[in-house]
């Protein structure tokens, strides 16, 4: 147990607590702010692990951009507040499943990486220069591919988020599914008659 | 290859022509003056002539080396698929049978299907169906055979479901397809098992000829042979309607009658028997395999006959009769009767086609399938009567008809088998004899009910009420047999409701037109000489090198095949297993000739070689080729058969001779009839024994596999065994199995209906289910190790 | 470090085409935007032209993380041909609805760029990026009919399940990195080989988690939930893309991960994937029986098909290169044989659906009379999916059965048993459609089926391919058989 | 620094995120939870590289973490766009309302 560990435990408690608040808070804006705390805690963890550059990217990208994006998202969609409206009926299932997974993971992790085989060591990081070299030599191909992926994500996000629905604003509408071939099939619950705004041709 | 066999090179033409016809009809049929039927008939006529030439050449030249040709090859996953042709006597025999029946059926359909909506489509399908069967027949390797086999299944699906407006017909098509499809995969597995065994010795692993050679040389391990053959036999059980997978066959009557004729006589059902015969030298390597075949065959031949007795629908009588006759063929193959089995296949093809077409002629005139609606038809339809009578006599095995020769040949091969100390032979012999009696009885019953007495007309109930309706009502318990019988009786005696001339408001029954009658007459005439192909006449003509069915269909491999499991096999295999070890078929052959020969025994005398060997067998000498050669004249067998025939006819006459009785005795045999006739009663067992337990009690606990067909069948059979304790031996009725199949299908649908609710539409539940799956995977496969 | 540009030429061409399409879309207006389609097709053809010469080569670049060998080329050809077919069935569909054509083709091309990379990637990082490049445009394309509730629902379900699986996979990858210190597949295989008989359970767990990511792409049960809903809600050509190309990409990745990296632990993942195969085909087929919407039926059927394709994975044995090669070849053969009829079936649905919006099975009634060509095509495709002659589907099933029979383990026979039972069930619903098309008469007043020229051409080509490959399966079998996966390490 | 600490923290954050994905109705909150899961992975990667595989010249762990950040950002963008579109169509971003398609 080094002093670094003690600091880490403090950071971890804050981070984990904030994460729990993020997914349980009844107030949307609070949830987003707790997300900010969690992300900052993760950044601090990176710092403790001596990964300075990753920590910086974390702060810039997540705290600086993504949290803000989420706040915009919450405001634009004017979501109501309160447990009933924020939590779905699947809460018990979610609790059970994630608790089970956590239990299994912790047991497995402790068995595999218990401190016996892995005593405390000083974290050693690569320098930013090394990182840059690695990205632009070994990992240059994934890097280029990611750029295309980002372009596609950008185009796609703009396309979906902007107001008009198409070049001419018309779409073929979805046809209601017609009567069953065999009677054993149940009725499709909702007649999608009200769906699809575009005109028929 | 000897000169004069060039026609064999053109066997592919026989296959290709129907295919071309099908394509042309499908593409241009609607534009043609005769709606495409002319193309089908013309193509089939050319194919038929070609087959006759091929048939004659192979016939005249005796057992020849097969002509094996490969037209194109295609490698798949390191293996080579070849498409080609393999022509020998067996192939030639099938070509003749298939093209003859198909040609006549098409001619017949011109009239029978006249005015149907999808007349053109029907003809395209007929041609395609014939093509599929021929692909199988000339297959030089098992893969091509599978292709043909599967195509036959698909075509039959579309033809059986032709009258789609009635749901029961569609169900029948589905059932036929699913049952045979289930069996088909057995064939696939069997072929692959054999090929894996063969692959140790040669690259051409699917070649039929090489497989046979290796099997005969004993190169294949006995496990390979047993597993391979049994799986292939499973395929044959499904396709050839052996119990317990015969359930589709009676239902397949839902198709138009010409289709029934084609299915039951020449294509589809014969595929299984043919394929077993094709690989026969492999099958005879293991006694286990032979016994399984014989047992299945004998069960089928015996029990299916009983079901025919209680049918009212003429097509169902014939359907169960087909099942029973297929049982004869299989049983014959199972007791070493190679020639007997395929000879019966050959003759049966002709007279069963005749019977179906005859029944179609009746149905065409009466607009009803039910014999209770007929009666006295011999006055209205004399041609149909005579031809139908001839077909019935042939089926019953009346002396000098085709069925007489082939069926007796089967009995004799069974006896020879028994003489070798193989108990199956005895069973096949006696049950086969009993089966013959039953066959004669139900055919006589049909004849009397249809053609004698007074015409009863379509009864008072609406003429639209079909057999399917009646069955549906019975299944739902609306009618019981008593009520049904009284109903009929009442109908017969009530002048208001049973007009003798009114025919349900239609015209009086009339004879069919020339196209139908041509087909009938040709087949009726053929019902005699095809039996003679079995032997004796040709001896006289051909001199020392006699030509008969045996020499025709005995392939080169069959000539040399021996039974490794018979005592004496050792010495012979040491000698090289060659030479005189001709096949059992020779035996049956000579047999057939000798036995039934009562009046004709002089003419029936086999050639000198076979006679010598026959003497050996008569002395009781045991060797692995003991079945080769004719035994002494079996007057006892002949007399027994004849007595059975006469007794059955007399019995039928006593009951039905004076026309339709108020109380049909076969419908009033107490518990026996209850079992045989009351479909609803037994469906009930299938329903209660399979569906309800699965649905209500077993469902939560039953594993996944319990919902699928196989398990359903097993449970259906299980329910049947319980019944057996209560009722009589009749309880082993296909209807339980039928119910089981339905039950399995039902429970699959039921599960399917439940399972779809997993797809709740709620994406978070999807996530939960997915995570749960991950956790289970991790725990079971990772953490638990 | 020298880069082998020849090896990545197909990817480069596709990238250039994608950017070109995006720019051209800015310039063109209205009707002219349709030009994006032929432009993309040309790009795909050029990429194909650069791919085929790579046949027979063994190239490796980017430090061995990108490999081009026969195995990769086979997949790339399948992808590019699928791309061409999907472009064919897309044209009218998108041109008439007029929504975001340029962007659609751009996204489609980027998605296929990810697919092309997938079979060549020999590094978990690259595989992950390729997977994301396939998925992200897919999320958008699924939601392309913006005013359609179904479409946006399709997108959100696809997105959430997709992101969730990727998160699980990443967790597994991070653990795998912790154990092995590398993300290169061969490096992982080496490191895993040293663990011997008693690996820590967490290692095996992370291995299974990595498989989850690909299990999502191939829609194996229980990661399949998105598939039916997303297919049904997406524009139909997109559903075809998801059902064929995207699934094939998932298999390419899965094969690489399992047979190269995790080969030493085949004893764990083979039975796991075998069980998944059983669940997948059984559930897929049983639920498919209940469907009335044609697209949903095809969706469930494609779930079931994934189960068949998973069967060979259940046969894998550590250290037995012969069995493993046979299994991989059977899968590849099946995938290639599955792609053709499945795109075709979606194409026919597009033809029926176009203008009219009809898509339930009932709407196919009487197709045999209304448009015999489409009915024949659909029949061929469905027979092939079911595995009946005269279609390549028969040989596909055959390849699987053969791989199973040769492996001869107990699990193999269990798998074959389920294959048998499931083939029967599957035929039930495939033939139901065939039967409806030929035997039922359509309702009164159904709009005529008017497929466009290119849709007809594509359908005809696919029918031809389905039947031709039945006659000459060697055309693909030759190639799959000579693929040597391990040689590309 | 002990390795086990960051690993357990990562597992905890991962499972908390997982809970959020399944339990939250609001689609934006679901996206937030997804971010938590992806971030948890980064802790693992960085911890493994800097504590165990310190000699990794390719800096695989950190580089991978950077890629994950990029991909996560792209996913948030696309995800939010999908959610906006859904909001515009049905004036609700409750994820369990989107169950038109089932069975």
Image (cartoon, coloured by chain):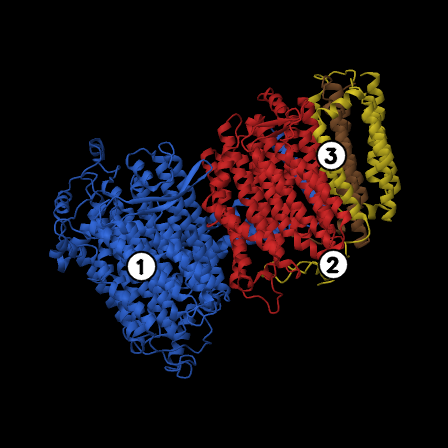
The answer to whether A119 is drawn above or below residue B632 in the figure is: above
Q: Chain B is drawn in which colour?
A: blue
Residue highlighted by disc 2: A196
Q: Mark 3 points at which residue?
A: A146
Helix, strand or loop for disc 2: loop
Looking at the image, can residue C221 be seen?
no
Q: Quadrant of residue C310?
A: top right
Q: Which chain is red?
A: C
Q: Nearer the viewer, residue B534 or B584?
A: B534
Residue projecting furthest to the bottom: B496
Q: Mark 1 points at which residue?
A: B48
Please, is residue C271 above or below residue A118 in the view? below
Q: Do labels 3 and 1 share a chain?
A: no
Quarter occupied by residue C306: top right
Of the 4 image quadrants, the one containing the C terminus of chain B is: top right
**How far from the left and from the top, in percent, is residue C115?**
64, 38
* Horizontal arrangement in the rendering, residue C439 relative to residue C190 (left or right): left
- Residue C145 placement (x, y as % from top left): 73, 53
Quadrant containing the N terminus of chain B is top left
Looking at the image, do the residues carrying marks 3 and 1 touch, with CB atoms under 8 Å apart? no
Q: What secondary structure is marked by label 3?
A: helix
Chain A display color? yellow
Disc 3 from disc 1: Cα separation: 68 Å
Chain of residue at mark 1: B
């Amino acid at each position: 147990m080094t002093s670094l560990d003690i600091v880490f435990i403090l950071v971890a408690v804050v981070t984990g607590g904030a994460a729990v608040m993020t997914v349980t808070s009844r107030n949307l804006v609070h949830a987003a702010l707790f997300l900010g705390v969690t992300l900052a805690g993760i950044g601090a963890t990176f710092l403790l692990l001596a990964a300075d550059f990753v920590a910086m990217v974390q702060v810039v990208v997540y705290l600086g951009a993504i949290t803000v994006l989420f706040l915009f998202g919450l405001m634009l969609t004017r979501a109501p507040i309160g447990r009933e409206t924020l939590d779905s009926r699947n809460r018990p299932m979610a609790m059970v499943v994630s608790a089970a997974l956590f239990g299994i993971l912790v047991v497995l992790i402790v068995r595999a990486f218990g401190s016996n085989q892995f005593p405390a060591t000083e974290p050693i990081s690569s320098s930013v220069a090394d990182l840059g070299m690695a990205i632009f030599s070994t990992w240059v191909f994934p890097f280029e591919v990611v750029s295309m992926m980002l372009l596609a994500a950008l185009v796609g996000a703009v396309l979906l988020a902007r107001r008009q629905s198409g070049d001419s604003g018309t779409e073929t509408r979805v046809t209601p599914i017609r009567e069953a071939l065999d009677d054993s099939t149940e009725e499709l619950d909702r007649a999608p008659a009200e769906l699809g705004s575009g005109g028929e041709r | 290859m000897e000169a004069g066999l060039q026609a064999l090179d053109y066997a592919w033409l026989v296959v290709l022509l129907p295919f071309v016809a099908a394509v042309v009809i499908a593409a241009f049929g609607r534009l043609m003056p005769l709606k495409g039927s002319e193309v089908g008939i013309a193509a089939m006529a050319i194919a038929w002539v070609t087959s006759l030439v091929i048939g004659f050449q192979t016939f005249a030249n005796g057992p020849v080396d097969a002509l094996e040709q490969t037209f194109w090859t295609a490698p798949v996953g390191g293996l080579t698929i070849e498409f080609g042709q393999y022509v020998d006597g067996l192939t030639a025999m099938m070509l003749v049978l298939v093209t003859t029946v198909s040609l006549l059926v098409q001619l017949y359909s011109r009239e029978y299907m006249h005015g149907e909506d999808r007349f053109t489509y029907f003809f395209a399908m007929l041609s395609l169906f014939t093509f599929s069967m021929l692909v199988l027949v000339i297959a030089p390797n098992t893969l091509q055979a599978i292709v043909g086999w599967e195509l036959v299944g698909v075509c039959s699906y579309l033809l059986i479901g032709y009258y789609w407006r009635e749901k029961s017909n569609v169900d029948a098509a589905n059932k036929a397809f699913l049952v045979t499809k289930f069996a088909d995969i057995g064939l696939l597995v069997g072929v692959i098992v054999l090929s894996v065994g063969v692959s140790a010795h040669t690259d051409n692993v699917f070649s039929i000829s090489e497989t046979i050679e290796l099997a005969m040389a004993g190169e294949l391990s006995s496990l390979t042979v047993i597993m391979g053959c049994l799986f292939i036999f499973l395929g044959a059980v499904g396709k050839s309607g052996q119990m317990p997978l015969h359930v589709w066959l009676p239902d397949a009557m839902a198709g138009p009658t010409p289709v029934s004729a084609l299915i039951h006589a020449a294509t589809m059902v014969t595929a299984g028997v043919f394929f077993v015969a094709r690989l026969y030298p492999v099958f005879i390597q293991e006694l286990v395999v032979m016994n399984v075949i014989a047992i299945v065959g004998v069960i089928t031949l015996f029990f299916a006959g009983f079901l025919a007795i209680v049918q009212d629908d003429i097509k169902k009588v014939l359907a169960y009769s087909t099942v029973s006759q297929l049982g004869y063929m299989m049983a014959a193959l199972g007791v070493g009767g190679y020639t007997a089995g395929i000879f019966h296949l050959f003759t049966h093809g002709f007279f069963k086609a005749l019977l179906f077409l005859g029944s179609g002629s009746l149905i065409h005139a009466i607009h009803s399938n039910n014999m209770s609606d007929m009666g006295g038809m011999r006055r209205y339809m004399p041609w149909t009567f005579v031809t139908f009578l001839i077909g019935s006599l042939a089926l019953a095995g009346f002396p000098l008809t085709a069925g007489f020769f082939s069926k007796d040949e089967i009995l004799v091969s069974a006896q020879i088998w028994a003489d070798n100390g193989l108990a199956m032979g005895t069973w096949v012999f006696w049950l086969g004899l009993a089966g013959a009696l039953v066959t004669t009885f139900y055919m006589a019953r049909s004849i009397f009910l249809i053609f004698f007495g007074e015409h009863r007309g379509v009864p008072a109930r609406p003429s639209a009420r079909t057999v399917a309706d009646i069955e549906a009502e019975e299944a739902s318990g609306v009618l019981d047999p008593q009520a049904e019988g009284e109903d009929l009786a009442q109908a017969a005696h009530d002048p208001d409701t049973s007009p003798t001339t009114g025919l349900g408001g239609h015209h009086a029954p009339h004879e069919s037109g020339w196209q139908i009658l041509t087909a009938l007459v040709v087949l009726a005439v053929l019902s005699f000489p095809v039996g003679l192909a079995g032997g004796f006449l040709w001896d006289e003509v051909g001199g020392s090198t006699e030509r008969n069915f045996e020499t025709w269909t005995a392939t080169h491999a069959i000539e040399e095949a021996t039974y490794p499991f018979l005592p004496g096999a050792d010495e012979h295999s040491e000698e090289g297993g060659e030479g005189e070890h001709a096949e059992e078929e020779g035996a049956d052959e000579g047999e057939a000739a000798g036995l039934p020969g009562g009046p004709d025994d002089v003419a029936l005398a086999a050639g000198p070689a076979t006679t010598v060997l026959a003497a050996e067998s008569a002395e009781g000498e045991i060797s692995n080729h003991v079945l080769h050669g004719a035994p002494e004249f079996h007057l006892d067998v002949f007399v027994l058969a004849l007595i059975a025939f006469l007794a059955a006819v007399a019995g039928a006459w006593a009951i039905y001779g004076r026309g339709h009785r108020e109380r049909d005795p076969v419908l009033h045999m107490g518990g026996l009839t209850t079992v045989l006739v009351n479909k609803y009663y037994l469906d009930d067992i299938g329903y209660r024994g399979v569906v309800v337990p699965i649905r209500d009690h077993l469902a939560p606990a039953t594993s996944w596999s319990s919902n699928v067909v196989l398990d359903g069948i097993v449970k259906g059979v299980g329910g049947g065994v319980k019944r057996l304790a209560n009722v009589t031996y009749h309880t082993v009725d296909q209807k339980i199995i039928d119910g089981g199949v339905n039950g399995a299908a039902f429970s699959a649908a039921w599960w399917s209906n439940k399972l779809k609710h997993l797809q709740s539409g709620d994406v978070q539940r999807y996530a939960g289910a997915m995570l749960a799956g991950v956790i289970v995977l991790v725990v079971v496969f990772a953490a638990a190790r | 470090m020298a880069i082998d540009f020849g090896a990545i030429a197909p990817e480069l061409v596709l990238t250039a085409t994608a950017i070109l399409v995006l720019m051209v879309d800015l310039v063109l207006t209205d009707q002219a935007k349709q030009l994006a389609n032929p432009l993309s097709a040309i790009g795909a053809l050029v990429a194909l032209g650069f791919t085929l010469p790579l046949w027979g080569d063994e190239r490796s670049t980017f430090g061995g993380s990108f490999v081009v060998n026969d195995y990769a080329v086979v997949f790339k050809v399948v992808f590019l041909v699928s791309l061409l077919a999907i472009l064919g069935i897309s044209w009218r569909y998108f041109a008439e609805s007029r929504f975001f054509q340029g962007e659609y083709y751009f996204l489609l091309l980027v998605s296929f760029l990810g697919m092309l990379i997938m079979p060549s990637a020999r590094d978990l990082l690259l595989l992950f990026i390729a997977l994301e490049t396939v998925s992200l445009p897919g999320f958008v394309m699924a939601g392309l009919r913006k005013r359609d509730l179904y479409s946006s629902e399709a997108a959100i379900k696809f997105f959430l399940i997709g992101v969730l699986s990727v998160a699980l996979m990443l967790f597994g990858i991070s653990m795998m990195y912790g154990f092995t210190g590398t993300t290169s597949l061969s490096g992982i295989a080496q490191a895993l080989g040293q663990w011997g008989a008693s690996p820590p359970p967490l290692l095996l767990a992370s291995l299974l988690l990595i498989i989850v990511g690909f299990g999502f792409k191939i829609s194996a049960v229980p990661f399949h939930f998105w598939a039916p809903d997303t297919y049904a809600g997406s524009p139909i050509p997109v559903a075809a893309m998801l059902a064929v190309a995207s699934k094939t990409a998932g298999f390419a990745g899965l094969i690489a991960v399992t047979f190269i990296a995790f080969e030493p632990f085949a004893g764990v993942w083979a039975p796991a994937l075998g069980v998944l195969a059983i669940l997948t085909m059984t559930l897929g087929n049983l639920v498919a029986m209940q469907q009335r919407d044609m697209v949903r039926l095809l969706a469930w059927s494609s779930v079931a098909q994934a189960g068949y394709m998973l069967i060979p994975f259940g046969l894998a044995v550590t250290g037995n290169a012969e069995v493993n090669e046979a299994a991989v070849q059977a899968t590849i053969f099946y995938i290639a044989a599955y792609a053709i009829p499945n795109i075709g079936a979606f194409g026919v649905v597009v033809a029926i659906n176009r203008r009219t919006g009809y898509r339930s099975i009932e709407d196919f009634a009487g197709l045999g009379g209304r448009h015999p060509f489409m009915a024949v095509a659909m029949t061929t495709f469905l027979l092939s999916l079911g595995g009946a002659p005269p279609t390549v589907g028969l040989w596909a099933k055959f390849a699987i059965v053969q791989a199973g029979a040769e492996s001869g383990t107990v699990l193999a026979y269990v798998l074959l048993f389920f294959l048998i039972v499931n083939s029967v069930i599957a035929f039930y619903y495939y033939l139901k459609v065939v039967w409806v098309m030929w035997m039922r008469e359509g309702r009164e007043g159904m709009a005529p089926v008017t497929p466009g020229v290119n849709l007809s051409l594509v359908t005809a080509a696919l029918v031809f391919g389905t039947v031709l490959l039945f006659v000459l399966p060697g055309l693909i079998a030759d190639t799959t058989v000579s693929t040597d996966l391990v040689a590309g390490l | 620094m002990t390795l086990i600490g960051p690993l357990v923290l990562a597992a905890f954050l991962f499972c908390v995120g997982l809970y959020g994905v399944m339990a939250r109705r609001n689609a934006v909150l679901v996206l937030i939870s997804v971010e938590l899961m992806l971030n948890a992975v980064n802790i693992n990667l960085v911890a493994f590289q800097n504590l165990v595989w310190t000699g990794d010249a390719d800096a695989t762990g950190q580089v991978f973490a950077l890629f994950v950040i990029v991909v996560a950002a792209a996913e948030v963008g696309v995800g939010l766009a999908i959610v906006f579109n859904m909001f515009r169509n049905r004036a609700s971003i409750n994820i369990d309302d989107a169950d038109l398609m089932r069975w």
